[in-house]
Amino acid sequence: MPEYIMQYLNYGILILVVALDVWMIEDSIRRTNNKWFFPIFAILLTFLPFLFSMVFGKPNFYLLISGVVIWLFYLLLRPEFTTEETKMIQTEQKTKDLKMKFYEYELAKSGKICPVCGLPVETDYMICPNCFKELREKCPSCGKLIDNNWTICPYCKKKITKGSEYEPKNI
C-alpha cells in the first residue's frame, strides 16, 4: 500500500477511537454515579499502548483498536437506564405503591374486605365467596344480619349467645 493511504488509514483509526471514547465518556457520565472511574479507565486502556509505542519507537496506530474492543465491552456492560431515568422509574414505583396502600387502607376502613383473604365483599354477605369465612350471621330474634363479634343485636336489643340458638347451615 502506498504510504499516504496508510497515513489516512492511521488517522482514520485515531479519529474513530477518539470519537468512540468521547461517546463512551459522555454516555457513562449520564448512566453511572461514579463520574470519573470509567472515563479515566477507558482513556488509559485505549491510549496507553499507543503512547508506549510512540515512546519506544514508531507509533503503531493498530494498537488503538483496543479502543474499539473497550467500546464493545462498554456496550455489553453499561447500565440500561440513565440515572435520571432510574430516578423516574423509582418515583413511579413509589407512587404506585402509595396508591395501592391508600386503596387497601380505604377498603379496610370501609369494612368491605374479607379479614382473611382481603378480597372485596358486600355489606350484606354472610360469608366470603372466596375463602368461605363467616362474616355475619342472622339475629335469632329479628333475623337481620349482624357482625359475628357483636354480643347484642343493635336492631332488636336482644343479647346474642354464641352457638346455642344459631346453627349455621352448611353450604
Image (spheres, rainbow, N blue to C red):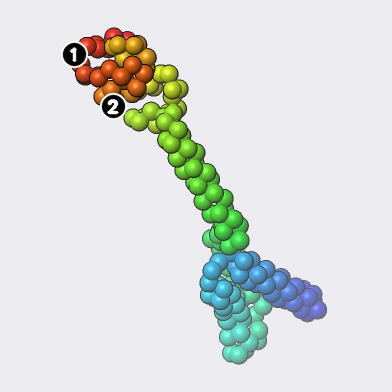
Q: Nearer the viewer, residue 79 or 17?
A: 79
**What is the x, y in percent for residue 87?**
57, 58
For the residue carrying disc 2, how many other residues have a C-alpha within 10 Å: few (<14), some (14-19), or many (20+)?
few
The residue at 59%/55% (across/down) is 88
Whether residue 65 is visible here, answered yes or no, is: no
Q: Nearer the viewer, residue 132 or 161?
A: 161
The residue at 29%/25% (across/down) is 150
In the image, is 132 to the left or to the right of 72? left
Tell me the tag on residue 164: 1
In the image, is 149 to the left or to the right of 105? left
Give the residue type that dot 1 points to.
Answer: Ser
Residue under label 2, please give it.
149
In the image, is 132 to the left or to the right of 102? left
Q: Secondary structure at mark 2?
A: loop
**What is the x, y in percent for residue 68?**
63, 67
For the residue carrying disc 1, how many other residues have a C-alpha within 10 Å: few (<14), some (14-19), or many (20+)?
few
Q: Residue furthest front?
A: 157
State the separation of the CA atoms marked 1 and 2: 15 Å
Give the residue type that dot 2 points to.
Answer: Asn
Tell me the tag on residue 94: none
Q: Is residue 60 above or below residue 86?
A: below
The residue at 50%/47% (across/down) is 98
Q: Is residue 105 above or below residue 87?
A: above
